[in-house]
Amino acid sequence: MTLVIAHRGASWELPENTLPAFERAIEVGADYVEFDVHAARDGSLVVCHDPPRGGEPRLEDAVELLRGRIGIMCELKTPWRYRRHDVVRRAVGLLPEDAIVVSFERRALEAVRWRRVLQHVGYGVSVRRAARYAWGVGFHEPRLTRRNFARATALGLVTTVYTVNDPARMAELATLGVGGIFTDRPDLLLATLRSLRD
């Protein structure tokens, strides 16, 4: 089964990393909402992709909205830049136990000591290195090959691919057996997966 991961919420329809985009992802039936977390200048944890400039949801508000309604994937953005604010420990302290913590930064995920961490690979971290501490790996869609997919699977890692909005590619990846697909269009991915089952 391929998980439907709403990338920054239903961000094709609504502004990314916003509570309405998260509500829409729940409404269409996604399995997970993925969102990004930064530390603001005052140290507060906010949901946004780029360094914060004000007006973003607080992490506490996002978790409160999503908890118990949909799976949560929390991506820690450049947490080492904000280590004086203890971003890693504080962020995971707000998450439910079944959340998945995601990052490009190996040091952050190794420090988390969380049950399920997902390491984005191919940008400084190999699949083999990630297998030492990660539950799963994220492949950038253009860089996914059958060889590195097979390696990840052989190492027992859950495989995910980001960010896919084309239905033909969605179908191809689901048929390959990837564990989850990040998409801005969770409604389209759900429809594509249904068509494969019919």
Image (cartoon, helix red, strand yellow):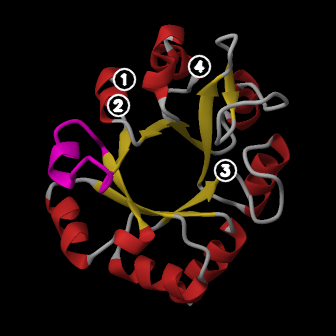
CA–CA distance in space, label 1 to label 2? 5 Å
Question: In x, y percent, where is residue 163?
Answer: 54, 65
The amino acid beneath tag 3 is Arg
- Secondary structure, mark 2, is helix
Question: In x, y percent, where is residue 15?
Answer: 81, 53
The circle on residue 112 is 1
Q: Give the prevailing secondary structure in the magenta stretch.
A: loop
- Residue 48 is left or right of residue 57, and the answer is left
CA–CA distance in space, label 2 to label 3? 20 Å
Of the residues under marks 4 and 1, which one precedes in the sequence?
Answer: 4
- Residue 171 is left or right of residue 40, and the answer is left
Q: Are marks 4 and 2 in contact (CB under 8 Å)?
A: no
The amino acid beneath tag 4 is Leu
Place residue 172 in its image quadrant: bottom left
Question: In x, y percent, where is residue 3?
Answer: 50, 62
Place residue 62 in its image quadrant: top right
- Whether residue 22 is visible: yes
Q: Please identify, in this view, whether the residue under mark 3 or under mark 4 is nearer the observer.
A: 3
Q: In the rendered view of the protein, which quadrant contains the C terminus?
A: bottom right
Q: Which residue is mark 2?
A: 109
Q: In the rendered view of the protein, which quadrant contains the N terminus?
A: bottom left
Which residue is at a point 75% across and 63% down the rendered structure image?
28
Magenta stretch: give its range.
Answer: 121-135
Q: Which residue is mark 3?
A: 8
How packed is label 3: few (under 14 Cα within 10 Å), some, or many (20 or more)? many
CA–CA distance in space, label 4 to label 1? 13 Å
The amino acid beneath tag 2 is Leu
- Residue 93 is left or right of residue 159, and the answer is right
- Whether residue 1 is visible: no
